[in-house]
Image (cartoon, helix red, strand yellow):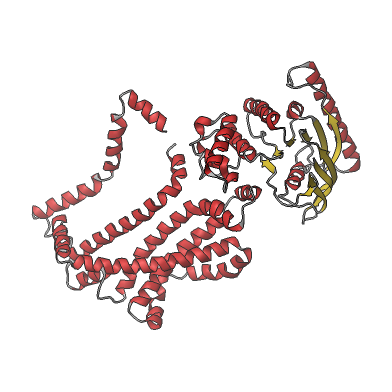
Amino acid sequence: MLVLDRVSKTYPNGVRALEDVSLQVAAGELLVIIGGSGCGKSTLLRAASGLDTPTQGRVLLDGITIAAPHERIGILFQEPRLLPWLRVADNVGFGLEGRPRAERDKRVAFAIERVGLTEKARVWPRELSGGQAQRVAIARALVTRPSVLLLDEPFSALDAFTRAELQDHLLDLWDEARPILVLVTHDIEEALVLGSRIAIMRSHPGRIAGVIDVPLPRPRDRLSAAFDEQKRRVLKLLDSTLKRQAHKAPLHDFQI
Amino acid sequence: MMISFQAVGAQGELRKPALARILRPALGLIVPVGLAVAWELAVKLGLSNGRLVPPPSIILSTFADLAATGELQRHAIVTLMRVAAGFGLGVVFGTLVGAITGYSGLMHRLIDPTLQGLRAIPSIAWVPLFILWFGIFEKSKIILIAIGVFFPVYLGVMGAVLSVDRKIVEVGRVFRLSGPAMVRRILLPAVMPAYVISLRAGLGLGWMFVVAAEFMGASEGLGFLLTDGQQLGKPAQIVAAIVAFALLGKLTDWIIASAAAPFLRWEDAFARR
């Protein structure tokens, strides 16, 4: 269980990025956090990963306080962030240094095979396409078998085709080990394809406006009527969040 | 890349790129070789006496004579040692100070303005002072060379450390690298390309400054061959020494480049595309 307990984050320049955010994600759950740009969803994820410390509140993983990056928490950024001086296989094995060579090789080979890039194992990152690079990043994050994987808009820089492909791929991988998965996005369709639950964020300061269940069976059909209906529901919710927000605070650059 | 080359080879068209690979660099030889041959002919045909601008054959025989007596090697080794010592000192200090000012904002504000001020001084201007301080022998020469090497290395290392991608450093944090591991696995490889460039720039300046240093009074070294050739009116000896400088400069640069090549192969993969 990953718990965010009344997490607030105020930057040194006085910007309140997060205020009193509480969330609980159970083992095997896939939570999607959706919100406009600048609503603090990346800040939330960084706090959950231990990369940034909240000004108030705390993050707990199975009762352990997370104040710094933890071996059980993997994180995937919007950019693949591969190390250009390491070949694909060495990038994937980056987090396994110190383990026996044989074990490392085996796990790296398996992880690369799972993301379908076996024939690219000896290639330099710069020779990969955007989608391939992000798949290598997924393999690198999963090779250490984290119990939590945090994803910060991991597919937003990809074309629609590659994005749908990687979403399905991520679901397959999640299904295998069922880690806690928290994904931040501004894409409603992505939220509905992936999420067991969707948390809607509002901005200035960033807080959770509400959490909804996604009552769609898996695998989800992006073209079904039920999917469309859910899409309208989320849109409406986002819209009303936006309106409530407009009464309380001046509208900045909230956009969906 | 490998795959595409093999595919081309399988079609029996490998000879074409192979030929092009030899011919393309050869194009660069046309102008210098052409000029040399033309000048040789001009002197042979009596169009010029070639006394002040000796033809290639004279330079070659002077070079061979100097080498045969062992003179050339003796002077070359002395110069090489000076460059090696000055380059070593300059690299050590340039790397240390550059890494410190690149890493720490406080040290940057504290040290960098002074160094930038010193850098603005043409280094040759130090020569008289160095002679007063360190005498006319090896010490002042090596320090002058070290200063020439120091600045490009310092600037290169500092700039490289400053421009290391914060996002890549964060990857190191996610995998909980310790301080030394962060340096070894993230920072060092990240600064490597810029570092090698600054080493090569530093070496170039080292060769420049060794000539200046040997001009300020030396009884040995390739720089001495230059001044000696001037005073005794032997232009062929001057050019022979210049050729030796060129060969040594190119050789030492090549040594650095090829020693660094294994660390920079990932860059090549990019450049070849």
Which quadrant does the C terminus of chain B fall into?
top left
Residue at 37% from the left image edge and 60% from the top image edge:
B204
Visible residue check, residue A256: no
Visible residue check, residue B67: yes
Horizontal relation, residue B196 to residue A155: left or right:
left
Percent x, y for residue B49?
11, 60
Q: Is residue B85 above or below residue A104?
A: below
Q: Is residue B186 above or below residue B216?
A: above
Horizontal relation, residue A6 to residue B74: left or right:
right
Say which quarter of the image contains residue A114.
top right
Residue B133 vs residue A162, the one in the foreground:
A162
Residue at 16% from the left image edge and 53% from the top image edge:
B39
Which quadrant does the N terminus of chain B fall into?
top left
Q: Is residue A199 above or below residue B220?
A: above
Q: How many marks?
A: 0
Residue A156 vs residue A122, the one in the foreground:
A122
Residue at 77% from the left image edge and 36% from the top image edge:
A27
Spot the residue most to the top: A225
Percent x, y for residue B69?
14, 66
Horizontal relation, residue B144 to residue A149: left or right:
left
Residue A7 vs residue A99, the one in the foreground:
A99
Percent x, y for residue A139?
61, 36
